Image (cartoon, rainbow, N blue to C red):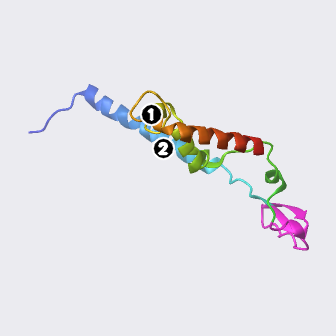
């Protein structure tokens, strides 16, 4: 037995295929009309090195630098106005920050009347303060 399709469902199925076919045709049109971009090469030559020759539509721009600059850091990167902390600082400074944090006041050896054995760290706290003052005076 052959199933009959209603005309409305036939039109809907054809309409679903049409936008995909139209989009595919547009992509093909764009691909045929575009032109490949030019190739531009910017090179630095050092000392007496010759500039390479351009091939085809290629554009070659050469800047001659002295031979002494061959292995140097580029001028734009040599000087920095501000000191940048690499990786967020050293592990030693992270340990110091953690040692003097808010929770450290109640730990043993913290020179605090609060917490277990807080009074045991008063001499250590005095020595830490003395070392910090000496460090600050040296800088």
9 inside magenta stretch: no
139 left or right of 35 in image: right
Name the mark nearer the viewer: 1 or 2: 1
Disc 1 residue crowd, few under 14, some 14–19, many 20+, Cα 10 Å: some
Q: Would residue 5 be found to the left or right of residue 110 on screen?
A: left
User: Which of the two residues, 117 or 86, is positioned nearer the viewer here?
Assistant: 117
Count of labels in the image:
2
What residue sits 70% from the left and 45% below the top?
84
Identify whether 48 is placed above or below 4: below
Quadrant for the C terminus, please: top right
Which residue ends up furthest to the left in the rendered image?
1
Q: Which residues are magenta?
A: 43-71
Alpha carbon separation for disc pair 1 and 2: 77 Å
Is any atom of residue 6 visible in this view? yes
Check disc 2 and report the residue beneath it.
24
Q: Is residue 139 visible?
A: no
Say whether residue 61 is left or right of residue 85.
right
Numbered disc 2: secondary structure = helix
Check disc 1 and report the residue beneath it: 118
Name the mark on residue 26: none
Q: Position of residue 40 (x, y in %)?
A: 77, 57
In percent of width and height, residue 48 lies at: 91, 74
Mark closer to the chain start, 1 or 2? 2
Q: Quadrant of residue 135?
A: top right
Q: Quadrant of residue 41?
A: bottom right
Nearest to the observer: residue 10 or residue 54: 54
Tell me the SS state at disc 1: helix
Task: Give left or right: position of 11 versus 129.
Answer: left
Across and down, in percent, residue 91 comes to 56, 50
Residue 69: in magenta span:
yes
Comparing 104 with 4, the one in front is 104
Give the quadrant of the N terminus: top left
């Amino acid at each position: 037995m052959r199933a009959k399709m209603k005309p409305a469902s036939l039109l809907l199925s054809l309409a679903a295929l049409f936008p995909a076919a139209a989009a595919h045709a547009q992509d093909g049109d764009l691909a045929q009309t575009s032109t490949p971009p030019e190739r531009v090469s910017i090179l630095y030559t050092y000392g007496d090195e010759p500039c390479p020759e351009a091939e085809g539509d290629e554009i070659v721009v050469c800047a001659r630098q002295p031979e002494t600059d061959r292995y140097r850091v580029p001028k734009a990167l040599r000087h920095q106005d501000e000191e940048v902390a690499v990786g967020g600082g050293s592990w030693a400074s992270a340990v110091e920050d953690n040692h003097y944090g808010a929770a450290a006041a109640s730990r043993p050896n913290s020179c605090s009347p609060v917490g277990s054995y807080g009074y045991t760290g008063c001499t250590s706290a005095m020595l830490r303060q003395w070392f910090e003052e000496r460090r600050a005076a040296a800088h």
